[in-house]
Amino acid sequence: MSNSTADFLQQLRQSVRDGSFIHLVLSRPRGGAADSDVSKVSVRPVELKSGSHLQFTETVGAQERHRNLDGDSACGEIESLFGSTFRHGHLYTAACDLTAKVKGDGVRLTRSKPSRKKPSSSESAHDRTKQYLIPEGTPCAFLAEIGVMTADGKVKSAKYDKFRQINRFLEFVEDILGELPAEGPLRIIDFGCGKSYLTFALHWLLIERHQLEVDIRGLDLKADVIRNCSSIAKRLGCDGLSFEVGSIETCQPTTDIDMTVSLHACDTATDAALGKAVEWNSKVILAVPCCQHELSQRLVPNLLPPVQRHGILRERFASLATDSLRALALEVLGYRAQIVEFIDMDHTAKNLLIRAVRRSSTRNVEAEIAEYRALRASFGPGPIALENTLGPALEVALDSR
């Protein structure tokens, strides 16, 4: 065991013993994870009737498994997993944050100031209040600058839904950080960034929380929006963050892109963004579709007549079917795709996020191809935007079976 590994695990055990332990995340499985493998393990303290325990949350595909262990057993389990099963470990304590990354035969250990507050006993119980990546009550410069939070860290009541949305988005990014390159700047493009609430949040997460190097470009067609975002970035000293007037169609990066973000792109603009992401060999795709009209007018007449009889149901069904087609197409093209809830329905109807991660190895996709063809038949013959933008790659993949 290397000195860095020993230091990391010693700090883990010490924090559990003295009560300063807050959270642990193990990620980046060795050798790439199959669908049945655990892709991430999160550990947090919980108070049960039998006393204090650590709860393990294991992510398997789109599912989560939970189990509770006492302190010594939990530390032993973590020691067996780090290094052998997972290459990255992120430990959060009241004293400091520690990040351990396996590099070749060694481990690189990074220590930084604590970024999380220790939850109260009531918050450690199963009915605890939500703990956000950007905590309430802690000043955050970019949130204050964009008007979500006051300078002293209080979330403005009128902006609380936006605060929740930002944190939810960061949770999705946090989950897939282990899939991104550990060295060099992370190259990220955000299409239609608008006021860039989430673009600034993404920069904060990667720079402030994880001390990573980034090259983030926010694109939007509105020149005044870009000027405002650029001004904010300059005032905040956001290294590696830039904004420019541009569109999905005109953007031409000179290197592969690590992450492509497209939030609330209207109708077929989401398909255009997915097409560019695949073309650029993007390792991660995050897309929140919006205003999906193209396929609602193309449903074959004999498909679910009771649904098509009602306009609102027809629109919603077509919208869900469109996102299903998008996820299946990404699976066929070598991604692990999920459709997850972006924010509660009470706060926005645009509540689904497509999260896709490029697989490290090929797999049999005959089932996905069959499902794609069956669902695609619901919209009759003729070209659709998704197939036009994904181009020959999808056509070749579909015709190969």
Image (cartoon, helix red, strand yellow):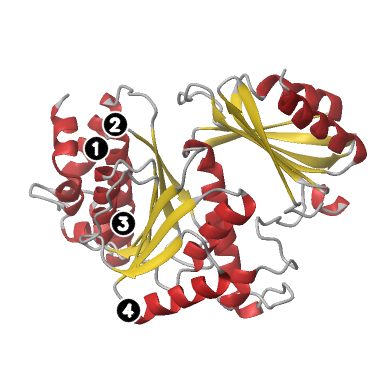
Residue type at the position of mark 3: Ser
Residue type at the position of mark 4: Ala
Q: Is residue 287 visible?
A: no
Q: Which mark identifies residue 223?
A: 4
The answer to whether the residues at label 1 and label 2 have Cβ atoms under 8 Å apart is yes
Circle nearer the viewer, 1 or 4: 4
Q: Residues within 10 Å of mark 2 (few under 14, many from 20)?
A: some
Residue under pointer 3: 319
Residue at (55%, 62%) from the top-left corner?
166
Residue under pointer 1: 372
Residue at (42%, 63%) from the top-left corner?
350
Q: Is residue 310 visible?
A: yes
Q: Secondary structure at mark 4?
A: helix
From the viewer's side, name the closer residue of 164 and 227. 227
Residue under pointer 2: 368
Residue 73: image location, x then y, percent:
81, 23
Q: CA–CA distance between discs 2 and 4?
A: 41 Å
